[in-house]
Each structure stands twice: as structure tokens, then as C-alpha cells.
Amino acid sequence: MNITRESTGELTATIRMEITPDDYQETVTKNLKDYQRKANIPGFRPGKVPFGLVKKMYGKAVMADEINKLLSERLSGYLTEEKLDVLGNPLPNKERIKPARFEDGETLDFYFDIGLAPEFTLNLGPGLEVENYAIKVDDKMVDGYIEDVRKRNGNYTHPESPGDEDMISGEVIELAADGTPVEDVEPKKTYFSLDKVTGKEAIEKLKTVKKGEWVVLKPADWFGSNEEAAKQLGLQVEKLSKPDVTFSLSITEITHVEPAELNAGFFAKVYPGEPIDTEEDFRERVRKDAAASFTGETDKMLYQEITKSLLEDTVMNLPDDFLKRWLYEHEENKMTEEDIGKNYSSFARSMKWQLIENRLIKEYDIHVKEEEIRGYIRTYMLRQVSQEFVDPEMARKYETIVDAFMQNKEQVQKINDQLFDAKLMQLFREKVTLKPVEVTNEEFIKLASEKHDHDHEEM
């Protein structure tokens, strides 16, 4: 087979593949003889069908199959041998390909257009400066964290009437116009904290109600809006949209939490094994935890900002006309020309990042090994702290579970992507100049929203 390549542009080329009878005739004849041995044609005994008849009936189809197979194998091999980094897939040049007759002795020419990946310079180094946001944990935030953990470890009591922050459990049921429960409707179990109630009259009324009693409520008046009422009572907001809708709340339980005292026993319970003796030490440890809880969001923004900067700073041309044609002709995409016109800039940006990512993978050998995935499953999925303290029999059982999990290709791919992103992030931290910027949580949320809106407008 003769294969040649002709440049048609800076990043495009056409590959010509000449297929002669020497390339396909022997295999076609062999396949036809297989058909002859297996053919079951009326009037002929099995295996006795004349070769000429088999060739007449199946020759062109067998030849077409063999040529298509040859094209696929040789084209793929040629791209690999020539080390051509193509974008998308080769596209048949329908203008230059002449219809094949698939007859004996026929020499066939096929033409495929390809788009080539561009050369580019990647400036990943100290010259790339990116703001690295850290959320400042103030005393108010620390107080909130401590109050929460004190409540979670506090002493639960059940008073007769609720206090300001007590939890109320009960059942609600919609009332008809005459004040009786709506027929054929089951009561809905609910629970909410008194501090979620905003209506002053409702708060005063609830503080006088005891366990086992009931009270009539207008949800929006109690919680400020139908949406908040639906959230607190566990009801569908549509049920609350009717004018003058009322419910009966029957109180079945009142729960009061007496927060745990700040003492050495409490510190040891929250942070076992750590040397925390004073309230100030405890506050600093909580402050550290609070800061760590924001790391996921701040790292996410940092990753986005670095990739955005790399995309903006990397000069790279793409074979746009070829890629638009590939999007249009590719069967799986099923995109119209109008769709391509609207979405091409976003596609080109994704393609550009894929090329940058491929360069990073190659230059810095970023790969996720199977054992790393298995280790992730052991640590996070099985909550296994250390293999050292597991007896051999238990270790084998764990590995059996890991083996079974590894069969879930979708989940394994998710873990692979997560570990890959972590490695890429580590590389960024090592190479890029990070400019620390401390912000409050409210400032960070506003900033993240503004950046999201801005990036969305650019796409």
C-alpha cells in the first residue's frame, strides 16, 4: 500500500492511500473460500457450492469489508509511525474519493483530511503569578464552631415548654375552613428549632404550649415566607400557596440541649490524644479546623485561576475550519452548523486546555497508578486507618472488597480523575508564584460568584 501526505495548510493535511489488488486479493479469496465451505444454498450440498457463484453473490461485500479494515488499520498505523498528533479524527475527503466498484483488479485511491495539533510554548513557572485566597477565620466564626460542637456533645433534656433555641417535634395537618383536619390526609411528622420562627406572636404562643398540646399556625406568618415554612416543616411549598391556609401543630416532644462545658474532659473528647489543656488552646485548634474546612473551595478557585491564566498566556492556533467540519460530520456529536457557531469558542477553549494538559502529563510524567487507586479505596472507602493493625485474614477480606470495587469502572474513573487533579494541583503549587490574599468568608463567596459570572460570559 502506498501512503503519502500532502500539506493543505499550516495545521491541516490530506493523506492519500492507494490500495492495489496485492493489498487485498489474497485475503478476499481466502474469505470467499470460507464462505464456500459454509454456504448453505438450495440445490447444492454443503461445501459444494461453486466458487464462481459464491464470488458473484458475496465478492463485492467481502472486498468492501476487507478494504475498510485495511483503511482503518493502515491509517492508524501510519499516524502512529509518523508520530502525527491529530485533532479529532481523520475525515474522508469526499470530493477527491471516487466511488469504488469493488471489482477484481481494481486499484483504489482514498483521501483523508486531518487536523494537526499546534506547537506552542508553555510558560509554567515563577513568572505565572496567581492570587491564592485564604479565608480568614475570625473570632465570631470560631465561636460558632465551638457552640455547635458543644451542642453536639451536650446534655439533652425534655422540658414541658420550649425555650429560645429548643427543638420542637410534632405532627402538622392542614385544616379545613371550619377548623377541622382535612379529610383523608395523614399528619406529617415535623421538627424545627424555635429560633427558626420569626413571627413574634408565634414565638410567644409557642413558649406557652406544652408537650401533648396543639396550636394553629399560619406557616408564612410563622417563618416569614412559604418557602422557608416548607423547608422548616418538611412540607411541599405548593401546599402553602393557597390563601389563608392554616395547619394544626400537635407537639409530641420538646428537646433542650445544655451545651457541654469547656473543660479538659470535653477537649479530650473532641480531640482525643492531643495535648489541649486550656480554652485558648482549644480555640486555636478549632480555628485550624475551621480554616481547613474552607480548603476545598479555595483550592478549587486556585485551580480554576491557574488554568485560566495558562489558557490566556499560551499562544496557540487551532485548525478551526477543520475542527468545525469534524464537529459537524462526527456522528456522535450530532451538531448543526448553528450549534457549532454558538458553541465553537467553548469547544476550542476545551481543546486548547486538553493540549496543555497533555503537555503537562508528558513533561512531568503525571500518571495515576492502579495501586494508588486501590490505596484510595482502602483509606477512604473502607475507613481503614492502617494496614499494620489488620490481621492477615482481615487484610484478605479488605482486598476482596477492593477487588470488587475496582470492577466499577465509573467509580474508578472518578477516583482516577480526583487523584490526577491532586497531582496537577501539587505541580502548580511547586511551579507557580502564589500571592496570598486573606479574605472573609462573605468576601470569598462574593468573589467566587463574580468570577463565575465573568467566566460564563466569556465562554
Image (spheres, helix red, strand yellow):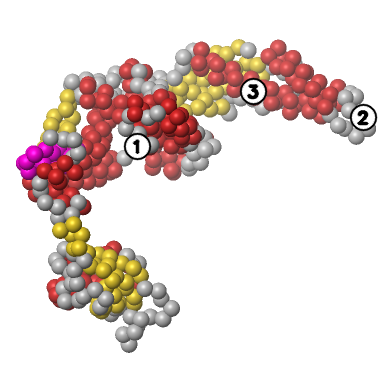
As shown in the figure, which amino acid type bears the numbered disc 1? Arg
Q: Residue at x 80, y 25 (%)?
A: 35
Q: Which residues are magenta?
A: 276-292
Q: CA distance from mark 3 to mark 1?
A: 49 Å
Residue assigned mark 2:
44
Q: Secondary structure at mark 2?
A: loop
The answer to whether one can see residue 1 in this image is yes
Query: Would you place residue 266 above or below residue 51 in this image?
Result: below
Q: Position of residue 110 (x, y in %)?
A: 61, 21
Q: Is residue 52 visible?
A: no
Numbered disc 3: secondary structure = helix
Q: Closer to the N terminus: mark 3 or mark 1? A: 3
Horizontal placement of 249 versus 208: left or right? right
Foreground label between 3 and 1: 1
Q: Which mark is residue 455?
A: none
Q: Which residue is mark 3?
A: 69
* Prevailing secondary structure class for the magenta stretch in the rendered image: helix
Would you say the residues marked 3 and 1 are in contact, meaning their CB atoms lie under 8 Å apart? no
Amino acid found under the numbered disc labelled 2: Phe
Q: Is residue 192 left or right of residue 22?
A: left
Q: Residues within 10 Å of mark 2 (few under 14, many from 20)?
A: few
Can you give x and y, in whole percent of width and height, for residue 292 in the image? Answer: 19, 38
Type of amino acid under label 3:
Lys
The tag on residue 383 is 1
Can you tell which of label 2 and label 1 is closer to the viewer? 1
What residue is at 48 percent from the left and 32 percent from the top? 400
Q: Which of 171/69 is in front?
A: 171
Tell me the quarter of the picture where residue 318 sits.
Answer: top left
